[in-house]
Amino acid sequence: MTKTNLKSLSLPELENFFLSIGEKKYRAKQLYKGIYNNRNTDFSEFTDFSKSLREALVEIAYLPTLKIVKHLQSIDGTHKVSLEVAEDKIIEAVWIPSDLGRKTICISSQVGCTLSCAFCATGTLDFKGNLKTWEILEQILILEKIVGDKCTNVVFMGMGEPMHNYKNVMDAAHILHDPETFNLGAKRITISTAGVIPSIERFIEEKQPYNFAISLNHPDKLLRKEIMGIDSKFPLDDLLATARKFTKTLGRKITFEYIMIPDVNMGEKNASLLVKIARSVNCKINLIPLNTEFNGWRRPTETEMIQFRDLLSPANVPIMNRRSPGKDIHGACGMLALNG
Ligand code: SAH
């Protein structure tokens, strides 16, 4: 008999599983709690189950994990793990501590990515599929176990495009938010997209409570498509209209992520276009220095970054310089998939 992977079952499916073996439905919630709150890895640890149920589960079911194929620790406290989902399917996840006590985990939503943004290492990999909900969550369980601590924030900014794996990503977010499991506040969970408009529409319709970020990266509607192929399918003007709908319908800010690439999207002209956008959308802006060196591009200097930020001040919106630690282990933004 093939054993059932209990982590792969949704709550209703788990309830049916327990009913099918003559148990009560509430066992499903207990199992979820055991896995995602108590961090049990073995049926023997489910002490709210009877001994006979624990023994029966060993025979008919299992609780899988992902194999750690690499673990690197940076001098700045960042940890990166490479995890094997299946043969030849590797994903990465990163633990990012900050001085302010924030402990962020950056997780992947897909194996590789279909988008091929010109600045991002993940785009150079073959796309090998969507992650299942449990595989998304397992990244957090594994990193927390390695570090011996719990995270305060989760960002869906690792490999892949979360809005191309909508259902599994949202199911994972709900489990992260559930008070009986991870119990993370909705504002501590951030979902990021390169701009998949239909999925953003769905997020708005469903009134999802999570933080939402759009990787804007270029403010010029003619030039954005040169660095982000997705712009040919979902053009900037339409994306901004959707962002406005988001802020109006949900009554909260959207975050624009903006990679600074000298000679590509910085300078006065781009700054004034970005100011115009920021004035038309209730937003905040996260500035990220380029971390890769494709296309002969380079990282901006500190002075260039300060100058660009100053040029944005007329926008009168919150502007953050996003730290991007873990460069020495290729764990920083846009570096997942680089060897090391
Ligand atoms: N596909 C989604 C989720 C990945 S998020 C998205 O695009 O939003 C990855 C973040 O890292 C994005 O904000 C992206 O713009 C940024 N990024 C990608 N490559 C980078 C690089 N080389 N340097 C700095 N940031 C980068």
Image (spheres, rainbow, N blue to C red):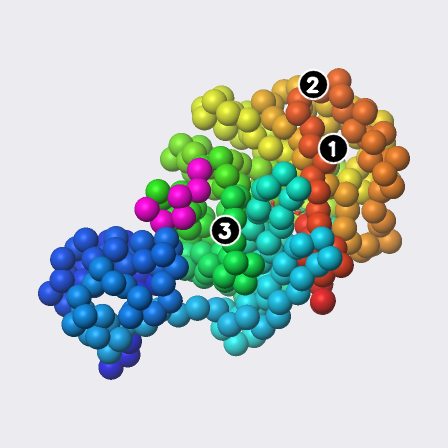
User: What is the total number of numbered labels drawn onto the structure image?
Assistant: 3
Disc 3 CB within 8 Å of nearest ligand 1 atom = no
Chain-order first, disc 2 or disc 1: 1
Q: Is residue 116 visible?
A: no
Dominant secondary structure, magenta: loop
Q: Is residue 64 visible?
A: yes
The x, y position of residue 275, in whole percent, is 73, 23
How many residues crowd around disc 2 within 10 Å: few (fewer than 14), some, or many (20 or more)?
A: few
Name the residue rendered at 47%, 22% in the picture: 251
Chain-order first, disc 1 or disc 3: 3
In 3D space, how far apart are the residues under numbered discs 2 and 3 (Cα atoms)? 35 Å
Question: What type is the residue that disc 2 sits on?
Answer: Asn
Q: Which residues are magenta?
A: 180-185
Q: Which residue is mark 3?
A: 150
Label 1 element class: loop
**Of 216 and 65, which appears nearest the observer?**
65
Tell me, for residue 197, which label it has, or none: none
Tell me, for residue 220, which label it has, or none: 1
The x, y position of residue 100, in whole percent, is 63, 38
Name the residue rendered at 44%, 42% in the picture: 184
Tell me, for residue 316, which label it has, or none: 2
Q: Seen from this angle, which residue lies furthest bottom?
A: 1
In 3D space, how far apart are the residues under numbered discs 2 and 1 (Cα atoms)? 20 Å
